[in-house]
C-alpha cells in the first residue's frame, strides 16, 4: 500500500514539477543518508566511494558526498554553490518561498549581513555569561528527573528542557512559547512523510516567531531579538528577525537535545569515557564531548548545495542547478580522515582540521560554542549526580527516529 501511494506521489511530482512543500514521499535512494542502526549510519551510506550520484525520479540531478575531504571542499566553496532553495517552491503549496530564510538558506551578501547581527553573541567569551543560568537549569531538571523516577525519561526531563530554556533566554522568548516551539522544532526535521510535513512545521514556527518579533518591536527585551531591535530598528525587517530566530531555535534546540540523549546512551556503554566525564578535568570533558559530536553527528546532512555553474566534484560532472547533499555523519566517520576504528568512541582521536558535526565554511553553525558549553555542563552534572545511571529498558526497545534530518530518540528511560 505504501509503495503504491509513493508511486502516485511521484507521478504528481513529475506532472507539476518538484515543490518541496508538496512532497509527501521520499524515494528509497534519498532516505539512505537519514537511516541508521542504533547510533550508526547504515553501512550502505558509505558504499560506492566518497561521491556518487543518487538515482532519484525527480527532474533534479543529485550528488551524495560521504568523503571527508570532498565534503570540506563542497562546503567551503561559497562561490561555486548556493544554499538558496526557493526555486524548489511553486508558490501555491502549503509552504512558500517566503517561509524559507534565515542563515541556512541564504547566500552572501544577505548571509554576511544577517550573520553579522548574531555572531557577536556566540563568541566563546560572550557565551560564558550564560554558564550560571545553564547550570541552574541543569540542576533544576536533574531534580525533576530524580523526583519522577526511577525510571524516568531523560529525553523529556533533561535533554529537551536544557537547550530550549537556553535558546529562549538567549533570544528573549516568553516561556509560554516554549511548548509550542518544542513541538514544532521536532516536527520540522521529520522526513517520514517527505518534506511536506517538515516545511509545514517551518511555516507554523515562523508565524509564531513573527508574533514574538512583534512583541519585541513594542517592548524590546534583554535578549538577542531585543538588542537587535534597539540597535538597528527598522533597518532589520520582521522577516529577517523571524528568520534569525527560526535559525537559532532550529540549530540550538533539537540538535543539542538529541546529542545529550544519544551522548548519554554512548557513555552508558563506555564506562571509561563516562568516568572521564564524571571525574576528569575540564580538558578531558572537552575531548569526550568533541568526540561524541563527531561520532553522533546528529545533523545527518548539511543544507543542500546547488551548483551555480557547470562544474565537477571528484570527477562527477554537475550542471548549473544540480544539487549536492553532504552526509555529515558519513564524512565524520571517513577512515581516511578519522583514522582507525571510526565507528568507535575514542576521546583525543588525532584528526586534522576538526570534525564536521557543525558543518564547515560560511554556513558552519553559528551556535557551535553554545552547544559545546551546554554539553560540557549537562553531561558531567548528570553522571556526578547519578553515578549508577543505567538504561531502564533493553536497547532494542529504544524508539530511535526512523527518518529524521536530526537523528535522535523519542524517549530515553533511565534508572538511578
Image (cartoon, rainbow, N blue to C red):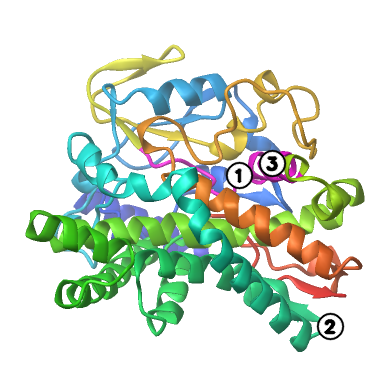
The crowd level at tag 2 (other Cα within 10 Å; few <14, some 14-19, many 20+) is some
- What element does badge 1 sit on? loop
**Where residue 365 is drawn, which disc sits there?**
none
Front label number (3 vs 2)? 2
Front label number (2 vs 1)? 2
Q: Main secondary structure of the magenta part?
A: helix
Q: Decide which of 10, 274 is in the foreground and name it.
A: 274
Q: Is residue 300 magenta?
A: yes
- What element does badge 3 sit on? helix
User: Decide: marks 1, 3 in contact (CB < 8 A)?
Assistant: yes
Query: In the rendered view, would you say 337 is above or below 42?
Result: above
Look at the image and tell me in which quarter the C terminus lies: bottom right
Mark 1, residue position: 297
Write the residue at 21% across / 64% down: 93
The crowd level at tag 3 (other Cα within 10 Å; few <14, some 14-19, many 20+) is many
Tell me if 318 is positioned left or right of 407 in this view.
left
Q: How far is disc 1 from disc 3 in space, using C-alphas?
A: 6 Å
- What element does badge 2 sit on? loop
Mark 3, residue position: 295
Q: Decide which of 280, 185 is in the foreground and name it.
A: 280
Q: Is residue 84 magenta?
A: no
Mark 2, residue position: 150
Q: Which residues are magenta?
A: 285-304
Q: x%, y% of residue 126?
A: 44, 49
Write the residue at 41% across / 74% down: 181
Q: How far is disc 3 from disc 2 in space, using C-alphas?
A: 29 Å
- Spot the residue most to the bottom: 147
Q: x%, y% of residue 143?
A: 72, 81
Amino acid at each position: 500500500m505504501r509503495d503504491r501511494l509513493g508511486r502516485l506521489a511521484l507521478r504528481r511530482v513529475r506532472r507539476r514539477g518538484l515543490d518541496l512543500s508538496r512532497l509527501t514521499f521520499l524515494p528509497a535512494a534519498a532516505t539512505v543518508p537519514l537511516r541508521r542502526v542504533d547510533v550508526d549510519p547504515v553501512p550502505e551510506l558509505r558504499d560506492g566511494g566518497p561521491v556518487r550520484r543518487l538515482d532519484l525520479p525527480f527532474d533534479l540531478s543529485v550528488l551524495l558526498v560521504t568523503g571527508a575531504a570532498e565534503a570540506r571542499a563542497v562546503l567551503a566553496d561559497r562561490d561555486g554553490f548556493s544554499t538558496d532553495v526557493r526555486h524548489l517552491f511553486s508558490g501555491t503549496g502549503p509552504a512558500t518561498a517566503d517561509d524559507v530564510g534565515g542563515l541556512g538558506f541564504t547566500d552572501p551578501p544577505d548571509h554576511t549581513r544577517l550573520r553579522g547581527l548574531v555572531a557577536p553573541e556566540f563568541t566563546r567569551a560572550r557565551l560564558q555569561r550564560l554558564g550560571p543560568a545553564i547550570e541552574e537549569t541543569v540542576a533544576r531538571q536533574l531534580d525533576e528527573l530524580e523526583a519522577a523516577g526511577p525510571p524516568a525519561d531523560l529525553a523529556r526531563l533533561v535533554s529537551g528542557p536544557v537547550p530550549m530554556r537556553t535558546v529562549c533566554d538567549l533570544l528573549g522568548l516568553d516561556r509560554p512559547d516554549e511548548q509550542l516551539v518544542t513541538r514544532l522544532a521536532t516536527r520540522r526535521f521529520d522526513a517520514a512523510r517527505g518534506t511536506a510535513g517538515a516545511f509545514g512545521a517551518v511555516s507554523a514556527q515562523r508565524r509564531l516567531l513573527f508574533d514574538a518579533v512583534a512583541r519585541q518591536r513594542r517592548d524590546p527585551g534583554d535578549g538577542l531579538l531585543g538588542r537587535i531591535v534597539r540597535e538597528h530598528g527598522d533597518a532589520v525587517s520582521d522577516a529577517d528577525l523571524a528568520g534569525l530566530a527560526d535559525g537559532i531555535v532550529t540549530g540550538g534546540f533539537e540538535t543539542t537535545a538529541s546529542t545529550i540523549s544519544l551522548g548519554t546512551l554512548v557513555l552508558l556503554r563506555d564506562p571509561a569515557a563516562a568516568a572521564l566525564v564524571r571525574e576528569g578535568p575540564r580538558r578531558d570533558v572537552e575531548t569526550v564531548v568533541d568526540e561524541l559530536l563527531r561520532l553522533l553527528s546528529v545533523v545527518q546532512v548539511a543544507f543542500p548545495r546547488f551548483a551555480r555553474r557547470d562544474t565537477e566534484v571528484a570527477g562527477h560532472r554537475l550542471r548549473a542547478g544540480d544539487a549536492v547533499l553532504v552526509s555529515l555523519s558519513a564524512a565524520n566517520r571517513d577512515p581516511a580522515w578519522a583514522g582507525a576504528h571510526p565507528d568507535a568512541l575514542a576521546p583525543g582521536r588525532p584528526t586534522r582540521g576538526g570534525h564536521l558535526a557543525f558543518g564547515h565554511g560560511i554556513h558552519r553553525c553559528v551556535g557551535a560554542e553554545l552547544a559545546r558549553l551546554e554539553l560540557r555542563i549537562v553531561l558531567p552534572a548528570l553522571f556526578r549526580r547519578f553515578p549508577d545511571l543505567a538504561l531502564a529498558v533493553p536497547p532494542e526497545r529504544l524508539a530511535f527516529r526512523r527518518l529524521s534530518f536530526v537523528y535522535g530518540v523519542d524517549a530515553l528511560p533511565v534508572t538511578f
